[in-house]
Amino acid sequence: MIRLRTVKLVIFGEIPAAAERFKIFFLTLFVFRTKKGKTEYFANILNTLKAMKLLEGKVAVVTGAARGIGKAIALEFAKEGADVAFTDLVIDDNGKATEAEIAALGVKARGYASNAANFEETHKVIEEIVKDFGRIDILVNNAGFGISGAVEFTSTEDAKSLFDVNFFGMVNMNRQVVPIMREAGRGRIVNLSSVAAPVPIPFQTYYSATKAAVNAYTMALANELRPFGVTVCAVMPGDIHTGFTAARRKIGEGDDIYQGRISRSVARMEHDEETGMDPARAGGYVARVALREGSHHPLYAIRIDYKFFVFLTKVLPAGALNRLVYLIYGK
């Protein structure tokens, strides 16, 4: 049995876990290419590599993971052998079912009721997780929700509540986990952002602003922690078919003044979400990004069309880009 987490080979030096399957296979292919019976041998090697658990012995924490993309991320970690602690506002029947589903993959799993927007609760839950699991290697800040509506009809209290969860919930968790990772000399933090950060959407103004804040925070924090072996990145999904759509707080006031543009924009966006990416696929992508523990790349977009949109933000003049967004979501 090949034991592989970080493997040292003379040719490659130290190999990050996520690249081990491929590098070891191709090294084997090079060394044994003249051996008889190589077809059977290579088949055995491939089966061994497929069976590898790249996160065995590690602990991953995922917020907002009782359902949706958070649950999908947690399951992907478990498939790679990680023990998983997850949080949500309440651990109801859905949360207990998620816990059982993760544990069925042969790892330790536990759900914790905690509000990431509350600093004292995040302090308490991280203490409990460290007590129960002994360590934290990966943190995925996934908890969040959305508000739609015109800025002038959205109360400051509603806007603050959005920032409390989408931005300060992430900040609270990171403040608790960063010292643990810094002292360990390694760790991986993944913050869930959105393509609405580089491409702000009208009538999703505050949501877009929270995710733009996530991106800026992520890039700055990554440089703060770089010397300590802790890497930080943000993943920017696009439209995903989850309960996020139904949970959105809709403020329809003023739609007549805006000539029906609010309702049309929200309907277009919700159609895109309902026909969007499967959460399991999105969760798998986030988990793969988390595996790149040695990477200092700060921002990732999911799916080729959203990557193209992000690319446009870098090449189009701001006015042209904003006009394009207006034609899609604002007209």
Image (spheres, rainbow, N blue to C red):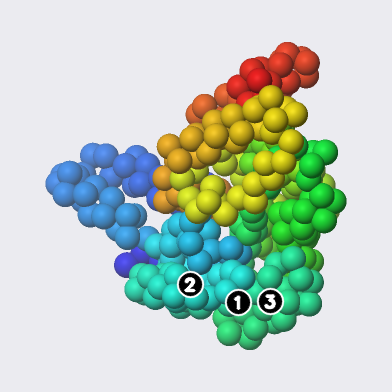
* Residue placed under numbered mark 2 in the picture: 95
Q: Kindly identify the amino acid type of the residue bearing the numbered disc 1.
A: Ala
Q: Kindly identify the amino acid type of the residue bearing the numbered disc 2.
A: Gly
Q: Residue at x 38, y 70 (%)?
A: 101
Q: Residue at x 57, y 24 (%)?
A: 308
* Residue placed under numbered mark 3 in the picture: 126
Q: Is residue 67 visible?
A: yes
The mark tally for this picture is 3
- State the CA–CA distance, disc 2 to disc 3: 18 Å
Are circles 1 and 2 on residues that touch, CB within 8 Å?
yes
Q: Which x, y percent locates residue 322?
A: 73, 20
Front tag of 2 and 3: 2
User: Secondary structure beneath disc 3?
Assistant: helix
In-front residue for pair 244/136: 244
Q: Is residue 18 visible?
A: no
Q: Residue at x 70, y 30 (%)?
A: 256
Mark 3 or mark 1, earlier in chain? 1
In-front residue for pair 229/81: 81
- State the CA–CA distance, disc 3 to disc 1: 11 Å
User: Secondary structure beneath disc 2?
Assistant: helix
Q: Kindly identify the amino acid type of the residue bearing the numbered disc 3.
A: Ile
Are circles 3 and 1 on residues that touch, CB within 8 Å?
no
* Residue placed under numbered mark 1 in the picture: 113
Q: In the drawing, does residue 51 fall left or right of residue 234?
A: left
Tell me which corner region of the image, top left, top right, bottom left or bottom right, holds residue 72: bottom left
Q: Which x, y percent locates residue 252?
A: 67, 41
Tell me which corner region of the image, top left, top right, bottom left or bottom right, holds residue 328: top right
- Residue 322 to residue 35: above or below: above
